Amino acid sequence: MKKAWAWLALFAGILYFALPLIGMTEFSLKMRRGEYSFDAYAKVLGDPRFQQTFTYSVGMAIVTILFGVFLIVPTAYWVRLKLPRLRPFIEFVTLLPLIIPAIVIVFGYIRLYNTSSWLPLTGSATGTNLLLMFGYATLAMPYMYRAVDTGLRTIDVTTLTEAAQSLGAGWFTILARIILPNVLVAVLSGAFLTFAIVLGEFTMAALLNRPAFGPFMQLLGANRAYEPAALAVIAFGITWGCMALIQIVSRFAPKAQSQPH
């Protein structure tokens, strides 16, 4: 009986998520009256604004991922190696972006870094892009940190560090040639999640007036009928593609091992 209820709950869950997606996909194919076509997709993909905003967001995602790796990997490694008592505090800090709304963060950025402040980042396109990248990195921090921390649990950080130091390796060599390759699968999982977050984020990009993919989706949805549905299907496919890649790379991750106390 329990098994039947479990299958029923699973089926209901699939219908709950699948039916809206099926309806949206069907609607996006009805741009040509009386028949199904990919006209809406062709218009979206051929729109110069789509190409501009998508390219911008992909570039921002790559920069954000690189910044996140350089920030999170050394921090998580050092906390696990030298400061294990600070782990609860660090984990609490990394959870704050899930609690504090993005609109609060971006308004704080605008207030602190406007043209009348001591560091006027919003006064130039480069400075605003840098500020937006920091915002994206903040939103992605809970996912990137936990992915890296989970990867570090699968290796004996202390033994690897001591072995490398006994051979004369410095801290940069240890991080770049020993720790990072061993947690690369975890880093890739965090990177794919970061990519999906950056691609769909709206609030920060809109308030900072950046030509990102999220504001373009909202603008298109306010002025067109079929194209927004096609764009939503494309964005959904990209997001699920990232999730599939996470599942693929996770298969190559080493299993967690018990750490000596």
Image (cartoon, rainbow, N blue to C red):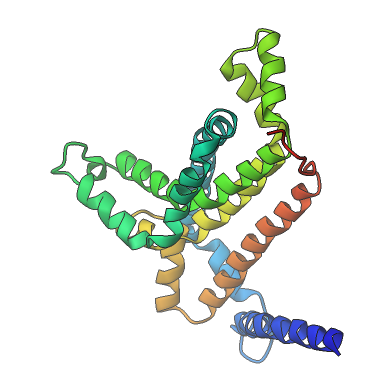
Query: Which residue is at the front of the view, 68 or 42?
Result: 68
State whether residue 256 is above or below residue 82: below
Q: Is 252 on the left-hand or right-hand side of 241?
A: right
> What residue is at 21 percent from the left and 37 percent from the top?
119
List the single residue furthest toward the left. 116
Answer with left or right where residue 167 lies relative to residue 125: right
Quadrant placement of the N terminus: bottom right
Image location (x, y in percent) of residue 53 = 46, 55
Give percent across and percent down for residue 3.
85, 84
Quarter occupied by the C terminus: top right
Dividing the picture into quadrants, the one containing residue 123 is: top left
Residue at 66%, 56% (x, y): give it. Answer: 242
Q: Where's residue 144, x and y in %?
A: 56, 47
Relative to 42, does residue 11 appear above or below in the rendering? Answer: below
Q: Is residue 77 visible?
A: yes
Look at 64% across and 20% down and name the residue there: 174
